[in-house]
Image (cartoon, rainbow, N blue to C red):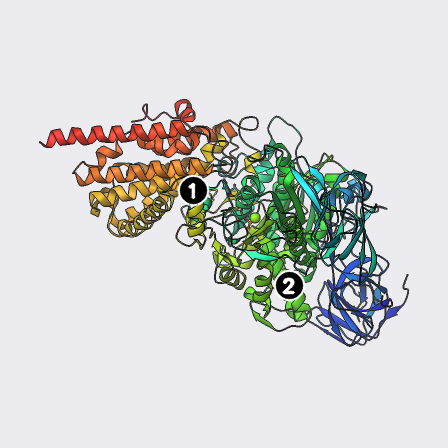
Amino acid sequence: MTEPGTVIEINGPLVRARLPGIASGEQVRLGKQKLTGEVIGLDDDRALIQVYESTEMLRPGETVIPLGYPLSVELGPGLLGGIFDGIQRPLTNLREQAGDYIPRGLDVPALERDRPWAFIPNPDLKAGQEIRGGMVLGTVQETASTEHRILTPPGVHGELLELAAAGEYDLKQVIARVHTPLNGIQDLKLFHRWPVRIPRPYQKRDDGVAPLLTGQRILDTFFPLLKGGKGAIPGPFGAGKTMLQQQIARWTNADIVIYVGCGERGNELVDILDSFPELTDPYSGRSLMERTLLVANTSNMPVVAREASIYLGVTLAEYYRDQGHDVVMLADSTSRWAEALREVAGRLGQMPVEEGYPAYLASRLASFYERAGRVETLSGESGSVSLIGAVSPPGGDFSEPVTNHTKDIIQTFWALSKPLADARHYPSVSWTESFSDAVEAAARWWSENVDESWQEKRSLALNLLSRAEELARIINLVGAEALSPIQRWTVEMASLLREGLLQQNALDEVDSYCSPQKQFALLDLMIGLYQQGQALVKADVPVSALLALPLLSRARRSKNLYGNDQLDELHALGEEFRSQLEKLRQEYEEQNS
Amino acid sequence: MREKEYRYASAAHNGLLFLRGVPGVAFGDRVSIRDQRGQKRNGQVILSSDELVMVQILEGTDDLSLDDTWVRFLEAPFEMPLSPDILGRVFNGIGEPRDDRPPIVSRLRRNVNGQPINPIARAYPREFIQTGISAIDGLNSLVRGQKLPIFSGSGLPHNKLAAQIVRQSKLLGEESRFVVVFAAMGVSYADAQFFREDFESNGVLGNVVMFTNLADDPPIERLILPRTAMTAAEYLAFDLDLHVLVVLTDMTYYAEALREVATAKGDVPTRKGYPGYLYSDLAEIYERAGRVRERHGSITMVPVVSMPSDDITHPIPDLTGYITEGQIVLSRELNNQDLYPPVNIPPSLSRLMKDGIGKDDTREDHPRVANQLYAAYAKALEVRNLASIIGPDELPDLDRKYLQFADGFEQRFLAQGMDEDRSIIQTLNIAWELLSLLPGDVLSRVSEADLARYHHWNSNP
Ligand SMILES: Nc1ncnc2c1ncn2[C@@H]1O[C@H](COP(=O)(O)OP(=O)(O)OP(=O)(O)O)[C@@H](O)[C@H]1O
Ligand SMILES: [Mg+2]
């Protein structure tokens, strides 16, 4: 390890220190307060250090102690249900030790060392056998819904000397001993460390095959994301990024959810902490908090730790992926992370290229999102990390650097629209600006699991919406009177689709989560209504007669009227529509003849 | 204690003082300066190395002589002395009295920068505050512990609205009133006086702590002022268990002072010349509002932000909106029609209302009514726009009803007197009168049960 050094200059969160022989990336502790920092650059024997805590009252001449390892995470049982700050300090313990405010320099391990876990060794492993990084040493039941596989740390390779018998072990105890040619005998425990900036290894990448379901119609039905995919939610303030991410966290069919509050509001995390334990996962039936892990670096916490929080989150996600889980990580907001980068770059005097951002913004974003993916893990299982980042463009302008670069990287783009949000149309995902390149893959899943006509009806619906948009422009010029009956019907049905299908109130008990089957049933209902009505209009039934049918207002409300377990009623409603329309057709036919 | 005083600064400009060869100075240290006329100035270390120390001078560096300036490092950050006696007092940005009364003497002093609250220590704000103003209570409800700014513009009545909120705010079924922390940054004497008189005429002056740095006071002091004010607010709320309402006016002048100093320091400018850290800097102030678990008090915050050229995408309102829990936006157009309060409904929002309204808090139908009013008004504005192009007579029947709705909404729901204190039930009843102008079929945001109970379409041909 390198010798302690001294502080030379303090410029906000950036400190220069004399630290000969230090490596870039290494962690340090600064001054009497023992502030945590990370070396981010070297300049002869000067180290540039970004400090994760306020540097107030730090002075030149104070000591800097190198810790000998890079910024790392502790990976092991006890993470789920927890809430950590950007450098993985457990906020619950922090509060117990230090009260309501976060003091500086407190060093609390992420995982509780004394908590015992019932360990069941992997029956396929025997002493004398060769083991490699990623192999499963055994399991512990981390929460009622999640089995935690204890992995051989990547990089460890050698002969298994000993594996603990089934029983209770805490994190201090050795559960396996390995003889490695390189490092001699290594003791393995229930947890290990991993440097956050280095992606964890896997065997190979796979293609995504199944959609990451969210229970939100505008996402699942219109702009799907695959398990292992990368998605972004850009939108101006108040458009609904956080709500949408929270909805995904609640209702997704992933096994594990990592929610990273990066430079956003404290109350939003409390909202999750208060509500998730009470909510049940629609798939496992267990409390949602059991599969959720929070990383919180709120806007009033030190800026540079925001940058770390994103890497902490994705490393945690990879760790659960390596155990064969489907993980989704939500980052709210990636813009605050980019701003932390900008802040440090500015203080380093690096050349700003666009809006003050350094030239490496795009490549940092790309390499972060590259950590998403569906993989075959080192132990040969399949696991995935889906990454979904909120983007907070200044002034809601999507041409700004962070939105712009993100758009080039991701596969699914859920663009939030201010006019929709202003009209309280939520989720305010714009159906004209959003895109997904996963529709084909998702269609296979829908076709096999829900209905073969999914893709066709989805296209019809999008088509209907975009035609109505064109017609709206005409109406705004010359009024609705200028439309032909067919056009009027199109406009009316698009409005039905918007209200009855796209709009989905997160706060509505019935409609907050919509199963894929119900999503399709509603889509089917409305497309059916549209097509049958169109035929009637073509047969000269006046549009006003169609609009006078009371069933239309029923169709508008059907999302709230019928729960996910009332699909039969929904289908019956469809039948009723069909017969009512048929009756209407006959009436007019008789009149005309 | 560093007893030494230093002389011979090496440079001074744009509010920054540079000293060479003063070793071991703490970052963020408070600095006391005596200028050539023996006048005291205050400063803070914003960069420190053994070679160079940069000090930001709150009173500015105008006519500071380099040879005759004495600098003392106080070995402590800025602190606010705290005791119950701060109520009824007026202070400057660093907590010194401005009311010709003696300074606060107290052993309790706190760093004005505070410390970040541990997010898990927060209690989620849920208690509905009735402000008596329909545009707020009905559509953008305020809850105790929320930060809800007023986005305004020059000449718009944000002061009147803020004062009305302060005057009328109360919890349903509770007598306890708010104490007020009032922070004025860069506003005119007349504006500050308006609030003072309003507090006085309501007999609450003894429950108000004022911090003022007016338009003609040194601008850099504005950077500390809201921090000092929030330190006082935290003390009142979390040490004395009081419910505190903080009014910060005007955050735009605060941000402009920040830009001024950032430019002088040579910080990389981003949009409109504001430094990249404006977001974090504002968040350090705004996030100090809230509630804390197991503590009785609360801090509710109403910052006033004037939008330069009425532009809501300007960095100051924009970044504020990204931090606060909603915003009340004022409209010049409505104000020109002499409508008070001229709240521009579509862009206004309260994010915390969802947990503070409804069955046990206000009335069962409230969440859906609010949603429906928003949707119907948005539609009505579209229709109004169309009517202005093709003429109202060309409109279909339903659209004409929407026009009627829009007018009624503005004249009867939004508009109210400056002293009119409506109960939430009155507000909701007006809402239903207006929704009854529209047929039930199109009101898809309310439930069928709501319609049956409150909609009187048929009796209103
Ligand atoms: N799906 C939804 N259902 C119901 N209400 C919603 C929905 N999405 C958003 N809202 C409403 O909009 C408000 C703002 O949403 P949210 O906080 O998610 O915005 P945001 O885009 O994250 O804003 P910011 O960038 O400022 O954090 C919410 O408080 C809620 O009232
Ligand atoms: Mg948000």
Q: Which numbered disc covers residue A84?
A: none
Q: Nearer the viewer, residue B307 or A346?
A: A346
Give x and y (percent) for residue B365. 48, 28
Instruction: Kindly give the residue lying farthest to the left in the view shown.
Output: A593
| A154 left or right, relative to A447 | right
Residue lying at 36% horizontally and 25% vertically, measured from the top left: B456
Report the Cα–Cα distance between label 1 and label 2: 44 Å
Secondary structure of the residue carrying tag 2 is: helix
Give x and y (percent) for residue B55. 76, 67
Q: Earlier in the sequence, mark 1 or mark 2?
A: 2
**Which quarter of the figure has residue B37?**
bottom right
Q: Amino acid at mark 2?
A: Leu
Relative to A260, say whether B72 is above or below: below
Residue lying at 49% horizontally and 40% vertically, measured from the top left: A215
Q: Nearer the viewer, residue A26 or B136?
A: A26
Which of the image's four quarters has the C terminus of chain A?
A: top left
Query: Disc 2: which chain?
Result: A
Q: Which numbered disc covers residue A448?
A: 1
**Which quarter of the figure has residue A246?**
top right
For label 2, the crowd category at 10 Å Cα-Cα, with few meaning under 14, some 14 to 19 and many 20 or more, is many
Q: How many marks?
A: 2
Residue for badge 2 = A341
Is the CB atom of the residue marked by disc 2 within 8 angstroms of ligand 1's nearest atom? no
Residue lying at 55% horizontally and 32% vertically, measured from the top left: B357
| A106 left or right, relative to B192 | right
